[in-house]
Image (cartoon, rainbow, N blue to C red):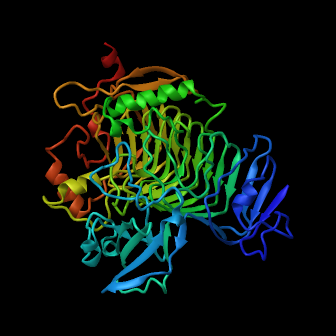
Amino acid sequence: MQIYVDLNAAVDGDGTKEYPFKTIQAAANIALPGDTVQVAPGIYRENVNPKHPGTAEARITYKSVQPLGAVITGAERLKTWRPVEGNVWKAVVPNSIFGDYNPYTTRVFGDWFDARIVAHTGEVYLNDVALYEVTTLKEVEHPVKNMKSWYPERTLYTWFAEQDEQADATIIYANFQGKDPNQENVEINVRENCFYPQKEGIGYITLTGFGVTKAATQWAPPTAYQEGMIGPHWSKGWIIEHCDVSHSKCSGISLGKYFQPNNDNKWSKWKYKDGTQTERDTICQASYEGWDKEHVGSHIIRHNHIHDCGQTGIVGHLGGVFSLIEDNDIHDINVRQNLAGAEIGGIKMHAAIDVIYRHNHIHHCTRGLWLDWQAQGTRVTQNVFDHNSLPNDFQVDTDNLDDVLSGLGEDLWIEVSHGPTLIDNNLLLSARSVRFAAQEIAFVHNVIAGSFTATGRGTDNNSVNLPSNRFTPYHEIHGTKVMGFMTIQHGDNKFYNNVFVQQKLRPAMQKLADMKKDEPDDWDDYNFIVGTKPFDGYPTFAEWKK
C-alpha cells in the first residue's frame, strides 16, 4: 500500500494520495510490511516513532518524494527574541514545548565523557550553524575566542540558558554578533530524536532521501543505551540511504546498544567496577538476551552525507554487527570541540563483527574511524581518509599542549581487538594514519601517508602501580558467541604491497613531534615517521613460538 504525507495539505487526511496525512507519524502509526510512505517536500518538525516492523520479504519504506526535499528536524524556530544589550538577545521559552524532556536542563553525561565540561543536550542554531554554549551570562556578553575549536571565529557566537521556576520557562541568552535573530533563521533543539523507534525489534525499515537534522541526543558510550537522531534501536535489517544527516548534539546515526537498566553508565555513577569490566558485563548480558545474527544487525548505511555532529557521525556497540557501511561522505565531526572524551570519531564502533566499511570519504574529523573492541572479521576497504588530525592552522605551545594532544587524532584507531581485521585499498592521508593498539591486522594495497602511532601501547587500564591488562572478548567465527577473553599481545600483523609516503609535516605538527619525541606515554608514542619502523623489534612467528 502507498501511504501519502504532505505537510502542506489543506487538511489532515487519511493517507490517500488525494487526502494525505500532514505528519509522518500518522503514516508510521499504520504502516505495515510492504507499505511505502511517500513524503512530500517540507520541514517536518516531529520525532517519528515507527510503530511496526517490516519483514525480510516485505520491508516498510519511508521515502522523500523529492530527494532531500522532506526534512525531519528535532528543532523549532524561535522568533520571540528581545534585545538585551549590545549583541545579546533574550528569548523566553515555555517549558511545555519540551514535554517531559527539556534539553536545556539535561546535561550531556555518560561513561567516558569528560565530565569537567558543562554541556546540555540543547543547542541554538543561527542559519544552520550551531552557536557555542557557555556557563555564564557574562560569557555571552563578553565572548572569548576558543582556540580549541577548528573554527575559532565561530566561538564568539555564544548562548547560555537558565530556568525561571516561577514561570516554568527556559530563558535563553545568545550573542548573535550583530545579527537580528528575528530576521534570521534561529532554531533551538526541542526533540531528542528525529526518526527512531521507541521500542526494540522494529526491523526491516528503509529510510531514503530525507534531510535529518538538529536533535538533542545524549552521549552514547558502549556501556549505556546508545541513541542517535536516526537508528534501528536494537533490531535487524535497516537501510538508511541517500540522506543528509547533520547537527546532532551527540550522534547522527546509532547502530547501538539497547537499554540495560543494570548496565547504564554504572562506571560513571558508581565506580564499583572499572570501565573495562563494566563493558564485559554489558557484552555478556547481551549474549544472554538475544544478541545474535537472527535478531540484531545486518544494516546497510549507504550514500549518505553525514556532518556537523558533536560526538560521532555513526556510533554503535553490539547492534551494528554484520552491517555494510558504504559510499558515505562523513566530515566535521567533533571539530567544534565543545564535547570531549572517548567515543568520538567520524565512525565509532565497538564489536564490528563482520562489518564492511567501503567507499567512504571520512575527512575533517577529530578522528576518522575508531574500531574499538571486537573488530573481528572486519574489513575496511577502498575508503579515503584525510584531514583527521588537527586543523590546518592549529598552533602549539607549552600552554595549550594538553588540549592539542587530546585532539590529535588519526585516520584509523583499532583498539584492543584480536582480529582478524583487513585494511585494504585505502588512501590514509592524514599526518597520523593508524593508532595501533590491537593485533592480527592485515594491511594490503594501501597508500599510507601518515604514521603508525601507539604501537604496542594503549591496551591497559592505566593503573598506576599494578599491571592492568585489558582482557577483551573474542567470538566464534562469523558469530556473536563469546569464546573467551584475552589480553593483547601486539602481534600477528601483516603488510603486503602498501605504498608509504612520508609527507612533510605542517610546521606546528613538526613542532609537536619535536616536543614529544622522547616522551611516550601509556597511550601514545607520538611517532610521526611513516612506515613499519615501529615493528622493528617484533619477533617473527618462529622466534615468538620458540
**Image quarter for residue 124?**
bottom left
| Residue closer to the observer: 399 or 422 | 399
On the rendered structure, is 119 left or right of 62?
A: left
Left or right relative to 260: residue 267: left
193 or 505, which lies in front? 193
Judge whether 327 appears above or below 255 on screen: below
Vertically, is 434 above or below 214?
A: above
Residue at point 52%, 62% (across, down): 98
The C terminus: image quadrant: top left
Q: Image check: 397 left or right of 359?
A: left
Q: Nearer the viewer, residue 359 or 324?
A: 324
Q: How many marks?
A: 0
Residue 314 pos. (x, y %): 50, 50
Q: Position of residue 415 (x, y in %)?
A: 38, 37
Relative vertical location of residue 346 with respect to residue 46 in this rendering, above or below = above
Whether residue 447 is visible here, answered yes or no, is: yes
Task: Answer yes or no: is residue 418 visible.
Answer: no
Coordinates of residue 525 in the picture (x, y in percent):
23, 42
Residue located at (36% from left, 31% from top): 276
The image position of residue 134, as x and y in percent, is 30, 67
Q: Residue furthest top?
A: 546
Q: Quadrant of the N terminus?
A: bottom right
